[in-house]
Amino acid sequence: MKSSFNLDRRIIYAFVVIALAWPLINKYTVRPARMKSAEKLFEVVESTKPTPGQFAFVAFDFGPSTAAENAGQARVVVEHLMRRRIPVVLFTQYLLADPFLKSIPEKIISNLETEMPGQKWIYGKDWVNLGYRPGAGILIQSISKSKNLAETFLVDAYSTPLKDLPLFRRPTQLKNISLLTQFTGLVGLFDSYVQFFQTADYRPNFGHGCTSITIPEAYIYLDSGQLQGLLEGIAGAAWYSKLLSDKYPVRKPDEAILINTGLGIAHLLLIGLIILGNISGIISRRNS
Amino acid sequence: MMLSITWIPIVALIAILLGTLLVTMLPRFFAGRNYKQILIAGITFLAGLYYFLDFVLPPKLPEMLGGYEFSKYHREISQGVITVGSMAFALGLFNLLYVHGSKIIFWKKGAINSIALLSSLFLMMVFTSNEWLAFEEVNDKAERIRTLAEFSRKIESDVNNNIATEKTPDERMVLLKEHAVIFVGETQLRLSEAKEDLPRIIRDGINNQSKEINKILNANFKFRSLGLLTPKLMKLAGDRQQLEDYFYKKSSTKKLYDYLYEGLFVPLGSAMFALLGFYIISAGYRAFRVRSVESGLMMIAAVVVMLGQIPFYIYISDALPDIRLWLLEIPSAAAFRAIKFGAAIAGLYMAIRMWLSIESSSFVETKKPGGGAK
Amino acid sequence: MIAVDLSIATTITAGVATLAIFSFLIKENPFYRLFEHIFIGIAAGLGIIQGLRYFLWPQILRPMLGYDILTFPDGTVSKPYDGAVLLYLIPMIFGLLYYFIYSQRHAWLAKLVIGFSLGASAGLAFKGFFAEMLPQLASSFKPLIVLENDQIVWWSSISNCIFIFTLLAVMYYFFFSIKADSAVEKKFSSSGRWLMMVCFGSFFGSTVMARLALLVERLQFLLVDWFNTLVSVV
Amino acid sequence: MGVEHATPGMLIVMFVLVLPLFLFIKQARGGRDLFVRRIAGIDAINQAVGRAAEMGRSVSFSTGLTSVSPVLYAVLGVLSHVTRKCAIYRNKLLLPQNAPDVMAISESVMKDAYRIEGRSSDFDPANIIYLSDEQFAYASGYMGMVHRENVASAFLFGYFAAESLILAEAGQQVGALQVAASVSPEQVPFFITACDYTLIGEELYAASAYLTREPVQMGSLLAQDRAKIVIFILIIVGVAISTAKAYWPEINWFDINAWIREPWDFNLVGIEG
């Protein structure tokens, strides 16, 4: 309780705000750390060929409380899929994720369309939003048995019948899903995909984005081969973003790298404070 | 008949367990207690007994013991138990009214905040109830059409199963037709109030369904038509629900509720949660001072894990992320588990003591417990 | 009916509320105090109605009042009223005994229902104990030597050994009745405590990221969404 | 993986685990002297109440998000003790509450404690403050309360989640002496960094026994150690078997886990058909 040298906590709070906000305001970035698990996911997306009738199933199962980590991951992966012209089908089992299903892809598309004038990403053909469904757990279980996903899901988030959308005009099944990616901080929702997203003879490649707290759980699945790639918190998203920028040099650095920089600086702040506290402790003990 | 060898000793064990319990506990149970205390302890025991037996007994007793399923009404009983607890909900409300109401009445310090509290409580109750009622109303309108579809199905099944009804099937058909015409007209009228931004699918759905229902009703409407009518009515009910939902989302009820919920409740919660970002840094700074082996180890582990999760680790060692993961997966997981094992056993023991009311400091007793608390 | 667009007001209010909470970091102040009280009021109002809406009404009251029965145009009903639902009146009335807590003379009646709740939770603890313990116990049975193609995998083997040692040492630390007299016992017990501290340290470290990420999300909201909305209004 | 009904294996394990409880309670009632090692955090409970009395400031006792459960019962033992101390020293004891039913139970315990000390008239129901059943609304109310009341000692006993650090920091900021006890190990690191004393896991259950030295509780505490020895041995045997299995996979080893999970088998062994 008593210590000779104690910074006022308000000064520490001010440092925290500066450390986190400064990169956001000044667009200051540092090179993110290399993440092998993120590289694996990048390779999986790179090796997925855009084939007519095939698409990627992307689940956003995060709310505002983990959006700082999960939304960054979702952004880079969806962007990568769109750049590679792999149709993206978005879905969530989590009510609070619903707004992201619209805002994230629309932002990415407007960025891509300004970057590449003339190119278009059309709703229904290049991406579809299935929205949130109550009782989605049962829906997930029925995907593997479905003969036609358009009949399983019936309508998209805007109540348009799926069979009216170009992507679902022909019957689609689980084997039309070339890649499954899911982003969440909720372990239970992740488990349901691991368990049910497969048939006897086919399992799509599975990429997962977890929060920093659930990394140990996620690694169990990566080690067992049930996951083909993993984004570990915002750091994973940042390295993925860097890989994207290497591949597409015209691309502007995105928020993932900015946030990652801020979080890194704040960590260093704490480590620095700990060192400072210990040194001053040693000095004061010697003096007394 | 013989019993499977494995479970004879087990039945005996349960009997011994319960027997010892009862024999050793009974005299204590009544000793020195008045009727009120015995009643309280008795009810405590009975409430626990159901869940205890539900767990201990097999899902279905063997046929020779009657094949009884003890847990047959588990859902209903559990719901009853939850109901008991849920009746306490107003205690919280009473407390808030008491504490803050008296502050306002006697105009004590903080009375203005108490007014803010009670008025936001009141407002939120009003708007949440409104939201609930509006939601029920939306459902209700669709429900009426759905009921009609059920009616159509029932007429069909009653005739097929030769069930006699008060009204003849023909009379029922007339009623069905009357109501169907009314509901279709009502829905059409409602549709005409909708603006351009109503999703096409809802508008088209209602128009198609109405057209087809009218066709079925106006053409030679007889018993055989029911099979066609039922699904159309069901679909119309679904579309009607979406239409009402569209109006509801535009209503000021919904918007004011959303304002309170998304403008205050959610951000206040997120902001409180985010305070942890500040506090974890200041707590770390204050606490991680090397004073002993323990605090040193804790500090080192924390620093290593932190270094392993930020981009700057490359300046120190490439192995840091792996060390971080190892620390979390091996020693941390093991220590957590050990703590949980101990706590689980202590919790079980506590549960038994509380179930049987066997400690004199339990809240059943009202006299000073023995032994000296210094 | 006034149909106003409240989305801008919602964003602005959300930002003000966030700042009110953050202002506590400087010191406890009237601005914070006001929003603290508003928060408690809103949460209580929401909680009470939602408790009714999602439990008491659909599960108990609706069936009891027979509102789940459809009445057809000819006056027949979809299913007969099940009188057994009236049995729910017993827990409802019994639950009302909670309110005797305010009575001076009959406070013991409240203890009946309190005893009932405690007893029920005690009975549930048996199932809870096994549901929680078994999977954890089973996954603790790790082999001390991991073999792959008849080769010892050193890293996994050592990790498993450390895992089991930590598990046992920490459990040993919590033995209350053993006088750890011998040097070995003392070492074992204190190594349990040390390993526990390593565990707490690592958990603290890994939580820092999640908590800071929450804060970044709020700062982003303030700096981008809120600020932009504010500018657009002004 | 869910456990719904006991299997024969679970019944046997349960029997072995529970048996010591009754044996030791009998022994303790018989007046046997029972040794329990010192637990620093529990000693601090009395110290904390005393400090508040000296300073003439109030004490707060939070049960966090604890619901009606065995954990609550364990906390009530401590609450009763603290309340009685406060009644003797005439300290103001604040009880911020999270759930209405828990509030009723705590209120009943507090009233009894005041009556036991013959100070019923000092009991003020306005000190039992219902804050909110919403996690962070509760935290915000607690934070404000601790600052405005300027508490001298704060007890955080029971089940806590992410809000633990908010509660502990609030007390730290006003310089309160804080004793925390959390059954969930996840929150222990935050209590350690912000509180003066932290009880870990089952130490919370031990607290009441340690404070009152009441024979049933003491006996139960010692019996717990015996039950833990059973788990201890079970782990050692399980590890030994799986190690042996890794070495000699061809041998059909006894599988403890499968044995425990083996459900009832009522298929009658039909000797007579």
Image (cartoon, rainbow, N blue to C red):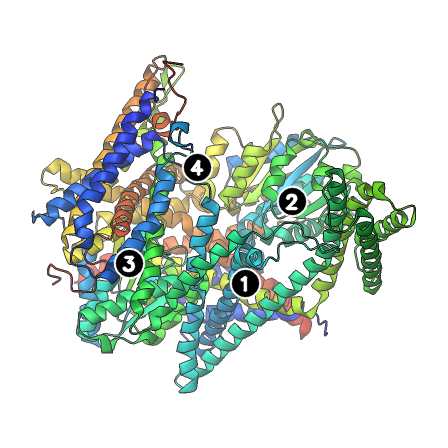
Report the Cα–Cα distance between label 4 and label 3. Answer: 29 Å
Which residue in the structure is indicated by mark 4?
B69
Q: Nearer the viewer, residue D63 or B157?
A: B157
User: Numbered disc 1: what chain?
Assistant: B
Report the Cα–Cα distance between label 1 and label 4. Answer: 45 Å
User: Which label number is shown at residue D130?
Assistant: none
Query: Can I make out residue D181 in this image?
Result: no
Whether residues under marks 2 and 3 lie with C-beta atoms below 8 angstroms apart, the answer is: no
User: Numbered disc 3: what chain?
Assistant: B
The residue that appears at 69% across and 59% down in the rendered structure is B140
Q: Are marks 2 and 3 on the same chain?
A: no
Q: Secondary structure at mark 4?
A: loop
Q: Secondary structure at mark 2?
A: strand
Which residue in the structure is indicated by mark 2?
A91
Q: Is residue C176 above or below residue C85?
A: above
- The three-letter amino acid code for the residue at tag 2 is Phe
Which residue in the structure is indicated by mark 3?
B40
Q: Is residue B346 above or below residue D104?
A: above
Image x and y of residue C197, in percent:
28, 46
Q: Secondary structure at mark 1?
A: helix
Report the Cα–Cα distance between label 2 and label 3. Answer: 52 Å
- Mark 2, residues whose alpha carbon is within 10 Å: few (<14), some, or many (≥20)? many
- Mark 4, residues whose alpha carbon is within 10 Å: few (<14), some, or many (≥20)? some
Q: Residue furthest bottom?
A: B106
- The three-letter amino acid code for the residue at tag 1 is Val
Which residue in the structure is indicated by mark 1?
B266
Q: Are marks 1 and 4 on the same chain?
A: yes
User: Numbered disc 4: what chain?
Assistant: B
